[in-house]
Amino acid sequence: MSSTTHSQEVQNTYGQLGLSSLAIRFAMGFIFWGGFSRRAIYAVAPADGNHFKLDVEHANFVGNKIAAAYPGSFMPDLLVSVIQNVSLMNFTMWLFSFAELAVGLALIFGFATRAAAVGGMLLNFGMMLVFGWMGSTCLDEWTMAAFGFAISAGVYITGAGYYSIDNKLASTGIGQWKIFPWLFSGPLPMSNDGLKKFSLWIAALTFVFIVGFYNALYGATYSKLKPRVGFHHQNIKISDVKITEEGALSFYGYVNAGPDTQAAYIIKAELMDEFGDVVASWDGSTMANMPDSNIDNFFKMAWGSKFYRTRYGIAGKTGAQATITLPGGDAEIEEGETYMLKLSQVEGKPFEFTGVAKAQGEGFVLEGQSAAH
């Protein structure tokens, strides 16, 4: 068999191999295209008809997804610093959106397909780091990122095949570049044994990505299911509890778990002594009618996760952080005694903080910790 004939057969094999990935290449590409188009083209807010999800001044800015997801991500501190820098947040969201657009269109039309596949793997890796813990019904975000990574990895091996821009470019001068098969499509410059080993390494990388993140997030690979961060119900971590001489109580609340589609609804707050007797309480009506200034949210931007007053008390969305001041009561606090702040919610267990009263200024501070939920 002549070298020309062998080369043509290899080329045909990769052309056919690319056909086998045509459907998944298009599917992955359309998912990325959909992510961009929903934000930049179709996401007009119905309230006024001229705001997009990529408008950083609007409450519907896509950054609200990051503001709700950071508590369970693998890099919460970094994400909080980005959220607080509005200009950087705006740039990051536009950059990510255009990356989705570029990768999506490249996969759909088969242009620089292997480079786009690497881009798809990186985008899904990033989504797993940030959103992989979320999904209250069927591990939604982990499933999307896992399949997206696997699809992208598979497309890298196959390339685009006959129906692609790459196939047209292969017969031009660009197709003669040594780097062409690594970034575009066509036969990879390696022996059959080399290709087998390379494919196994890609498969192993995909296996580690999927199983590794599953175990890290849900702990169910070789043990019982135990989510790293709760994604079914909200949790409020309470800290910095202070009581003034007038009886006003303030605390720092952080909604560090739960679905981003809901909020933790607080309908009653109680301060109790070590015997369980209530020394001060605030019902839902009191909290609902206190001034907005009593809730000092950490995130000031319109799209940031916040605590807010409701008709029956107060509520906080996932990711919200705020210093909340409950109006003065008639509590008599004694230094050295143990007290518990109990926040009752609409459903589920209450959120609690237990600490010892220490004199501070003209009031007291409770030194302790928030109860695990």
Image (cartoon, helix red, strand yellow):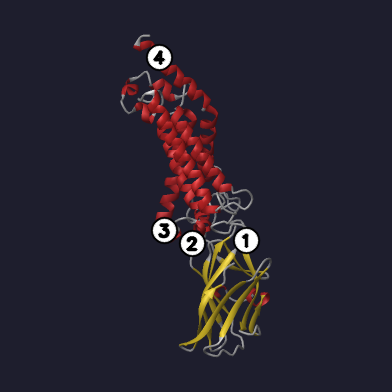
Q: Quadrant of the N terminus?
A: top left
Identified at 55% across, 50% down, the residue is: 222
Which mark's residue is nearer the viewer, 3 or 1?
1
Q: What amino acid is labelled 1 in the image?
A: His
Q: What amino acid is labelled 3 in the image?
A: Leu
Q: Few, some or many C-alpha atoms within 10 Å of disc 1 (few <14, some 14-19, many ≥20)?
A: some
Between discs 3 and 2, the one toward the N terminus: 3
- Locate residue 141, reporting x and y percent: 55, 48
Identified at 57% across, 56% down, the residue is: 227
- Locate residue 9, reporting x and y percent: 42, 14
Label 4 – label 1 distance at C-alpha: 59 Å
Which mark's residue is nearer the viewer, 4 or 2?
4
Question: What residue is pinned by disc 2?
Answer: 301
Q: Which mark is residue 233?
A: 1
Question: What residue is pinned by disc 4?
Answer: 8
Q: Nearer the viewer, residue 104 or 342?
A: 342
Label 4 – label 3 distance at C-alpha: 51 Å
Question: What residue is pinned by disc 3?
Answer: 78
Give the SS element for disc 2: loop
Label 4 – label 2 distance at C-alpha: 59 Å
Q: Nearer the viewer, residue 29 or 86?
A: 29
Asked if labels 3 and 4 touch by Cβ distance under 8 angstroms, the answer is: no
Between discs 3 and 1, the one toward the N terminus: 3
Query: Left or right of 178: which side holds 66?
Result: right
Q: Which mark is residue 250?
A: none
Between discs 1 and 2, the one toward the N terminus: 1
Asked if labels 2 and 1 touch by Cβ distance under 8 angstroms, the answer is: no
- Locate residue 11, reporting x and y percent: 42, 18
Give the SS element for disc 1: loop
Query: Left or right of 118: which side holds 250?
Result: right
